[in-house]
């Protein structure tokens, strides 16, 4: 608990230059209420009493053991001493004995934060005995609360300033990131008014993003369906769809066609932006360039079509080869077989020339059979299935 109390002054940064005019005014009022000319604002840490400000004189610091305010400030109670010389708690204080001062009258209201941490006291004092009324004590307690309010206001202003600086820093970082990435980012409010349009969006669309009319957007910005020919109606644009239907759009492919340059294929994702009450307050769109991907798909499709045509041609060639083999079998093999039979008959009648000729016919038959076997084997190796795949 003491550790948290000691951290509180650092959180309030009370060691920095204080708001002198405000605190001086409060001290003057405190002194007037008490009927004295001296008042101070004292902060107490683990070792010393630090006077943040003192009315009419320069602040004087002292060690915590020598401090009158340090004795009871954590009791969260108003302290009133009519004559310190006869008070057993304070009569030996160096502020009473003459070492540091000759105080007689002393009163203090604790400075307690909303979290319950006692920072120090609002103190009034004098060298003559004095009695305070209940009303005077109440007013001094109120002033202590006002001082804490001033501290809180000052802390809130500082935190707000720091938050604003941090927010600005993060916004600058975000803007720099969005300006650097190679993706178009566009945001709009609930009325379809563009609120953000990054570098990539400007480059791709060739515009600044300013669109006061918000109509005929697809035509004016060159937005087309994936075929690159059909314009996209305004009602089908991703931001329009998101705002109208409160849905998330993913994978919407479109083409940007500009007066100069090649068409650019884009894939868009968009989502609504919601307020704290869940209502749609805008939408954001991100588009990435998929031209290379689309071109690659087109090339693959063209290659597939060429392969299909090649397979069809191969099927036709195989059919021709089959027909050729049948023709060879019919037109060459059958006649050779007949000739071979006649030569065998002649050889049987004693014609030696017929036997030699029959041997030549057999060798020709073997050559033809070998050519047919090679042709059929080649057809088997390069043939195609019905699904067009090689086998």
Image (cartoon, grey):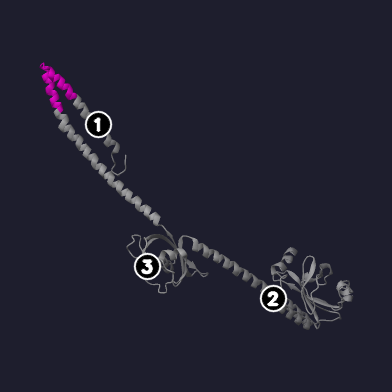
Residue 68 position in % (x across, y down) = 83, 72
| Label 3, residues with CA under 10 Å away: few <14, some 14-19, many ≥20 | some
Q: Identify the residue position indicated by label 1 in the image.
A: 373
Query: Quick one: label 3 or label 2, which is nearer the N terminus?
Result: 2
Q: Alpha carbon of mark 1 to alpha carbon of mark 2: how far? A: 108 Å
Residue 144 position in % (x across, y down) = 74, 76
Near-viewer residue (178 or 158): 178
**Is residue 225 left or right of 141 when viewed as pictured?**
left
Q: Alpha carbon of mark 3 to alpha carbon of mark 2: how far? A: 57 Å
Query: Quick one: label 1 or label 2, which is nearer the N terminus?
Result: 2
CB within 8 Å, label 3 to label 2 = no
Q: Alpha carbon of mark 1 to alpha carbon of mark 3: how far? A: 66 Å
| Quarter holding residue 345 | top left
Q: Identify the residue position indicated by label 3 in the image.
A: 218
Magenta region includes residue 341: yes
Quadrant for the N terminus in the image = bottom right
| Quarter holding residue 85 | bottom right
Residue for point 74% across, 73% down: 111
* Labels 1, 2: front one: 1
The local secondary structure at tag 2 comes to: helix
Q: Which residues are magenta?
A: 336-362
The local secondary structure at tag 1 comes to: helix
């Amino acid at each position: 608990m003491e550790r948290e109390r000691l951290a509180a002054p650092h959180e309030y940064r009370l060691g920095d230059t204080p708001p002198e005019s405000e605190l001086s005014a409060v001290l003057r009022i405190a002194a007037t209420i008490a009927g004295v000319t001296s008042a101070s604002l004292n902060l107490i840490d683990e070792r010393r009493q630090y006077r943040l400000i003192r009315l009419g004189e320069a602040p004087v610091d002292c060690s915590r053991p020598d401090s009158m305010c340090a004795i009871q400030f954590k009791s969260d109670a108003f302290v009133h001493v009519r004559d310190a010389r006869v008070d057993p708690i304070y009569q030996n204080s160096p502020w009473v004995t003459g070492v540091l001062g000759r105080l007689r009258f002393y009163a203090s209201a604790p400075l307690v934060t909303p979290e319950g941490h006692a920072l120090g006291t609002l103190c009034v004092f004098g060298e003559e005995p004095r009695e305070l009324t209940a009303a005077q004590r109440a007013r001094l307690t109120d002033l202590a609360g006002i001082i804490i309010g001033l501290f809180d206001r000052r802390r809130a202003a500082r935190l707000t300033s720091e938050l604003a600086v941090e927010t600005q820093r993060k916004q600058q970082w975000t803007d720099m990131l969005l300006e650097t990435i190679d993706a178009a980012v566009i945001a709009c409010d609930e009325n379809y008014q563009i609120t953000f349009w990054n570098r990539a969006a400007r480059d791709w669309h060739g515009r600044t993003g300013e669109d006061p009319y918000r109509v005929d957007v697809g035509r004016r910005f060159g937005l087309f369906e994936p075929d690159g020919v059909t314009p996209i109606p305004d009602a089908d644009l991703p931001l329009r769809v998101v705002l109208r239907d409160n849905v998330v759009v993913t994978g919407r492919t479109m083409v940007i066609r500009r007066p100069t340059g090649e068409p650019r294929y884009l894939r868009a994702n968009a989502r609504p932006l919601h307020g704290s009450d869940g209502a749609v307050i805008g939408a954001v769109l991100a588009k990435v360039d998929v031209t290379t991907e689309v071109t690659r798909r087109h090339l693959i499709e063209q290659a597939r079509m060429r392969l299909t045509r090649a397979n069809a041609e191969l099927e036709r060639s195989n059919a021709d080869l089959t027909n050729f083999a049948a023709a060879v079998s019919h037109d060459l093999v059958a006649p050779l077989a007949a000739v071979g039979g006649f030569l065998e008959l002649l050889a049987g009648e004693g014609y030696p020339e017929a036997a030699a000729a029959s041997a030549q016919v057999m060798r020709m038959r073997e050559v033809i059979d070998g050519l047919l076997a090679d042709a059929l084997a080649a057809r088997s190796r390069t043939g195609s299935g019905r699904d067009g795949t090689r086998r």
